[in-house]
Image: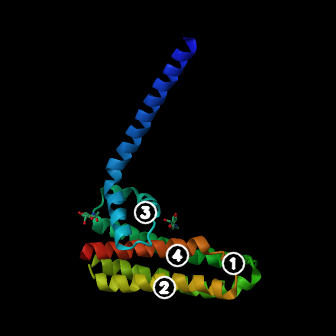
Amino acid sequence: MRNQSISLFSLFSSILHLFLVLNFYGGVTVNGDIVSNLCENVTRVDPTQNYDFCVSSLEANPLSKTSDIFGLGVISIELCSNNATYIHTYIDGILKDGKPEPERARTCLQECVDLYSDASEEVQTAMKAFKGKDYETTSRILYGAAINANTCKIGFTELGVDFSPLKKQDYDIYQLTGISLSIIRIILG
Ligand SMILES: *[C@@H]1O[C@H](CO)[C@@H](O)[C@H](O)[C@H]1NC(C)=O
Ligand SMILES: *[C@@H]1O[C@H](CO)[C@@H](O)[C@H](O)[C@H]1NC(C)=O
């Protein structure tokens, strides 16, 4: 009898806990609706996109919750721009450190520095074009930036470096440009 009432109590508190958790996430979901809705559309337009990556990337900017699709486009291009600039600095850091791992990756990294420095400049131009609703120019530039990231990645594969020191960075920028490109396709309908 005593055991039973303890387990009833713990059942009750589990239900209460579950309710609070659902309520909490429910609240977040309501605000985040536009983002999850958009990311569903993004994965539909481009099945290589990762839904969770899309949501967490856009939600990192608190303005995403109150933005329309155009505003989300600006946010996603901003992410591309910040990432490209960051990667450029990051590679510079590895090269200046003097010890890329493995050492023969140095040539690739030197090539990647240039690729990302172009990308970060070009993405600024893409942002201006997007704000001016010149979607064709925006797409062309972002596509070029994605190709650059991919060229950087391929460099390591060709060299036979199994684990590129930029694996995560190349992946991020590739996904981020993909989100922006998908948003443009969604806007154009
Ligand atoms: C997502 O797609 C649906 C169906 O086409 C559309 O009604 C909705 O407005 C889209 N939402 C966003 C944020 O793109
Ligand atoms: C680059 O994008 C990734 C994925 O959204 C994010 O986690 C990271 O913070 C971004 N980096 C910068 C410098 O914006």
Observer-side mark, 2 or 3, equals: 3
C-alpha distance separating marks 2 and 1: 20 Å
Residue at mark 1: 162
Q: In this picture, is 13 found above or below 133?
A: above
In percent of the image, x 29 and y 66: which residue is there? Answer: 69
Q: Whole-percent x and y of residue 87? A: 57, 75
Image quadrant assignment for residue 100: bottom right
Q: In this picture, is 183 found above or below 103?
A: above
Observer-side mark, 2 or 4, equals: 2
Determine whether the beta carbon of the residue marked 4 sits less than 8 angstroms from the nearest atom of ligand 2.
yes
Give amino acid for label 1. Answer: Asp
Residue at mark 2: 147
Observer-side mark, 4 or 1, equals: 1
In percent of the image, x 38 and y 38: which residue is there? Answer: 23
Decide if residue 68 is on the left or right side of residue 123: left
Q: Earlier in the sequence, mark 2 or mark 3?
A: 3
Decide if residue 71 is on the left or right side of residue 148: left
C-alpha distance separating marks 4 and 3: 24 Å
Q: Whole-percent x and y of residue 137? A: 33, 86
Q: Earlier in the sequence, mark 4 or mark 1?
A: 4
Residue at mark 3: 51
Residue at mark 4: 85
